Image: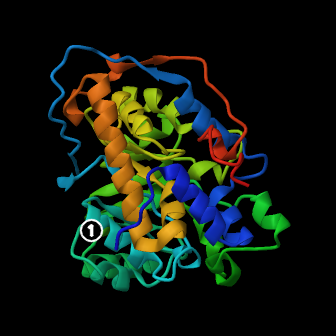
């Protein structure tokens, strides 16, 4: 199925038309004053690209690898809970889109359908993301299911000890389905470094720690043998008044370079955003809100089109920057610059037809 969107701005507008107010606010909002969410965007906008000229850029290769798996572009699907509220196929739509395009997806432990159904829907490599909803016996049981289903890595999310005050949702008197029914969320608040180490040992898989936001915690993660540090503030949906993920990235690169791969999310909306993250030390990035908007605009096909548009942007941006391969991108291609702030949703797109998104 082909969808004729020519920009990701169009996709966001289509998602806005298709989604109910409740689902739009769940997907697009942040915590409290949404300061962290906006800082994610400002952190990208505070970096400028430094292009080099007179380079043969007639052939561009956007591919890379992550944990030994080839990615068509260095963009993966972040874990999102309650995907079934955005598109009927839920996590299966994301898996099929990732397989069709040629990338990887993180499967949230609080989305539908089951982890086994999502795993069986495609043959491409997937990563399972775990929230703690019980003690170590419970963890062992779900990890055994993850391994039997064939997931190639485990991602543990560590920035959700308490569910944040997401005021758009609160004013709508709306909660995501998993939050309405679960009675064991309090176990997330019991997570310690010792418990993390036990879970890592149980898994025996490449291990990703999601929610790292300081160099100090990155160092402890490295001491525990974490394979991938996933810099994230939950898209600004957990602790408010935090730093943007791109502001955190340089200090974590200093302690982690050569010891663990680094990935990042938080307001990835453009090919130029991907280039900036790679230039400062990321192996790859993940998309959350943009993934959801693609699904809201057109399900699996809408998400594939999001990825195709990011690829188109990357090819053009790399050529104009003066690089032909992902491994050529380095910090020499970026510098600090005053941010340009726009009034529309997430300060992402300045020239949407008809004004603001909402």
Residue 154 % position (x, y): 35, 64
Secondary structure of residue under mark 1: helix
- Residue bearing mark 1: 99
Q: Is residue 267 above or below residue 186?
A: above
Q: Is residue 215 found left or right of 197 in the rendered image?
A: right
- Taking the image as shown, residue 330 lies to the left or right of residue 295, namely left
Q: Residues within 10 Å of mark 1 (few under 14, many from 20)?
A: some
In the rendered image, residue 288, in percent from the top left (x then y), is placed at 50, 56
Residue at 27% across, 76% down:
147
Q: Which residue is drawn at the image coordinates 62% and 78% (left, top)?
A: 178
Quadrant of the image containing the N terminus: bottom left
Q: Quadrant of residue 52?
A: top left
**In this image, 65 relative to 257: left or right?**
left
Of 48 and 144, nearer the camera is 48
Kindly indicate the quadrant of the structure image that contains residue 25.
Answer: bottom right
Tell which of 79 and 54 is nearer to you: 54
**Residue 237 vertical position relative to residue 334 in the rendered view, above or below:** below
Quadrant position of the C terminus in the picture = bottom right
Q: Position of residue 167 (x, y in %)?
A: 79, 58
Q: Position of residue 47 (x, y in %)?
A: 50, 23
Of residues 255 and 357, the one nearer the viewer is 357
Query: Is residue 151 positioned above or below 314 on the image?
Result: below
């Amino acid at each position: 199925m082909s969808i004729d969107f020519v920009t990701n701005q169009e996709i966001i507008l289509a998602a806005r038309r298709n989604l109910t107010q409740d689902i739009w606010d769940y997907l697009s909002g942040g915590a409290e004053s949404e300061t962290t969410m906006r800082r994610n965007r400002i952190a990208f906008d505070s970096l400028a690209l430094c292009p080099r000229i007179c380079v043969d850029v007639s052939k561009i290769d956007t591919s890379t690898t992550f944990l030994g798996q080839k990615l068509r572009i260095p963009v993966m699907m972040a874990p999102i809970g309650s995907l079934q509220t955005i598109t009927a196929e839920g996590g299966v739509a994301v898996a099929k889109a990732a397989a069709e395009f040629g990338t990887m997806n993180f499967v949230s432990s609080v989305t539908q359908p089951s982890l086994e159904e999502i795993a069986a829907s495609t043959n491409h490599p997937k990563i399972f993301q775990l929230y703690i909803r019980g003690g170590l016996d419970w963890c062992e049981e779900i990890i055994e299911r993850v391994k039997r289903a064939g997931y190639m890595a485990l991602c543990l999310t560590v920035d959700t000890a308490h569910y944040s005050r997401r005021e758009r949702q609160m004013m709508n008197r709306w909660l995501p389905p998993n939050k309405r029914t679960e009675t064991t969320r309090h176990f997330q608040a019991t997570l310690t470094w010792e418990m993390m180490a036990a879970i890592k040992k149980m898994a025996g898989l490449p291990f990703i720690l999601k929610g790292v936001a300081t160099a100090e915690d990155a160092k402890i993660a490295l001491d525990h043998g974490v394979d991938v540090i996933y810099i994230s503030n939950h898209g600004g949906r957990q602790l408010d008044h935090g730093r943007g993920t791109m502001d955190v990235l340089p200090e974590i690169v200093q302690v982690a370079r050569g010891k663990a791969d680094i990935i990042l999310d938080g307001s990835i909306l453009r090919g130029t955003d991907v280039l900036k993250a790679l230039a400062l030390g990321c192996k790859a990035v993940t998309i959350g809100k943009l993934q959801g908007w693609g699904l809201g605009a057109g399900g699996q096909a809408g998400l594939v089109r999001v990825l195709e548009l990011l690829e188109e942007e990357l090819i053009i941006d790399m050529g104009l920057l003066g690089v032909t391969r992902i491994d050529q991108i380095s910090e020499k291609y970026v510098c600090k610059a005053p941010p340009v702030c726009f009034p529309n949703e997430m300060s992402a797109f300045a020239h949407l037809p008809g004004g603001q998104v909402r």
